[in-house]
Image (cartoon, rainbow, N blue to C red):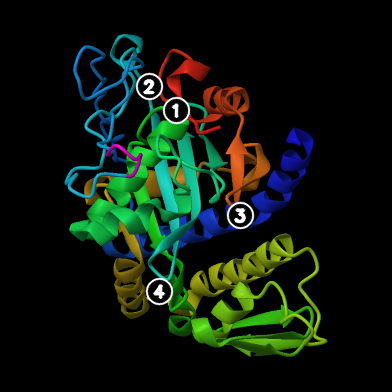
Amino acid sequence: MRQNNRRVSKRMSIFIKSFFIGAVSAAVVVIAGLLGINALLTPPQQVGVVAADANRHEVDEEGFLIVNYNDNGNENEEDDCPWPVYNAPHWAADAGRREYFWTFLIVGLNEGTNANTVMVASYCGITRRAELVSIPRDVPVHPTRNGRKIASSYIIGAARGGGVAGGIGRLQSDVKTVIGFVPDYYVLIDYDTFFTIIDAVGGIYIDVPIRMRYDDPCQNLYIDLHPGLQHMDGETALLFSRFRQANRGSGFPDMPGGDLGRIQNQQAVISAVISQLLRFENLNPIRINEFVGIFNDSVHTNIPLRDVPFFATELRHISGLDALTVHTFPTQAAMRNGVSYQILTPSYVVEIINATINPFNDDFTVDCLQIVR
């Protein structure tokens, strides 16, 4: 199973790398145009370690924050602070942080609700390497066992009246149970809104590989695309990116490779967007201001504005995709009460964390995590 997951991870890395580079490259264009980039930028201060206190009632014996749950195991609806009070396990204060090392929680929302993409990234300013670790959306999250997946963490937090802050807070708390710490920064991307940038750059050209036909009145989703090179606006590109299979019995073909085929289509869209963004005519102040408005609507982050130019300039030192490595936590498929899940193996998770995104000088152990098995 681990070998199979590695093959899937390698294929998925094509899209994940492209999307990450695409989103950040676009941000560089905007920031460079508005703020200017100079050689005197200093590295941001690292986020302080707020280590859990194992002697206080808010944490368990391993030093992790305990979210309030009622007697039947459901999350307490009256809990008005679901996000972490502590951002690290109890031993982290003594271990200390790695120098010039930052971590990021990257979240992709589908229609502003479910977190279809959950990744944790790290960047080392010494080696100038970036790592991306993907957490599969169907991973169940600790400690509830009532069927909640990490994909629904954001919408649960947002729906309780917390908006973006509540959603990202709930997700931070749940990600912490998987990796043992809260990443320094978050970047939240609404895919649907982000795709409006395609209209801003005048559309893109995509070679549609097969006849795509799918109807779902419940979602108001109607896909009808013919094979061949086509000029697409944002709405059409989004439909192209969402296609995975035809209606059963319709006689139209499914996307070869299923989800992996869809990932390749998404990669093609992102690559086309990058090419358009970096065209000379799109680098003038008027166009840049237009892009800024789109990013304000589709991207939310807690990275301070004063620190964005530093990370933007550091991007130049990531030489192509070789300096950006992508991993996916290995999982095993499981069915529980008729619902499919992807179950993590703690030993594999710890191995990847320590090799890629661990911001501390000491290694994590299996006991540091709260993974649902």
Q: Which numbered disc, 3 or 4, marks the residue that appears first in the sequence?
A: 4
Instruction: Give the labeled residue for mark 2.
Output: 99
Answer yes or no: is residue 38 visible. no
Eyeballing the image, is 95 above or below 223? above
Q: Which numbered disc, 3 or 2, marks the residue that appears first in the sequence?
A: 2
Camera-near label (1 vs 3) is: 3
Instruction: Give the labeled residue for mark 4.
Output: 193
Q: Position of residue 10 (x, y in %)?
A: 72, 45
Could you say which disc has been placed on residue 370 in the image?
Answer: 1
Instruction: Give the labeled residue for mark 3.
Output: 338
Q: Which numbered disc, 4 or 2, marks the residue that appears first in the sequence?
A: 2
For the residue marked with disc 3, what is the amino acid?
Answer: Gly
- The alpha-carbon separation of the residues under discs 2 and 1 comes to 27 Å
Q: Which numbered disc, 4 or 1, marks the residue that appears first in the sequence?
A: 4
Element at label 2: loop
Element at label 3: loop
Q: Check residue 353 for magenta coloring.
A: no
Number of marks drawn: 4
Camera-near label (4 vs 2) is: 4
Q: Is residue 189 left or right of residue 255?
A: left
Q: Position of residue 65 (x, y in %)?
A: 28, 28
Q: Give whichever of 313, 108 is nearer the camera.
A: 108
For the residue marked with disc 1, what is the amino acid?
Answer: Gln
Camera-near label (3 vs 4) is: 3
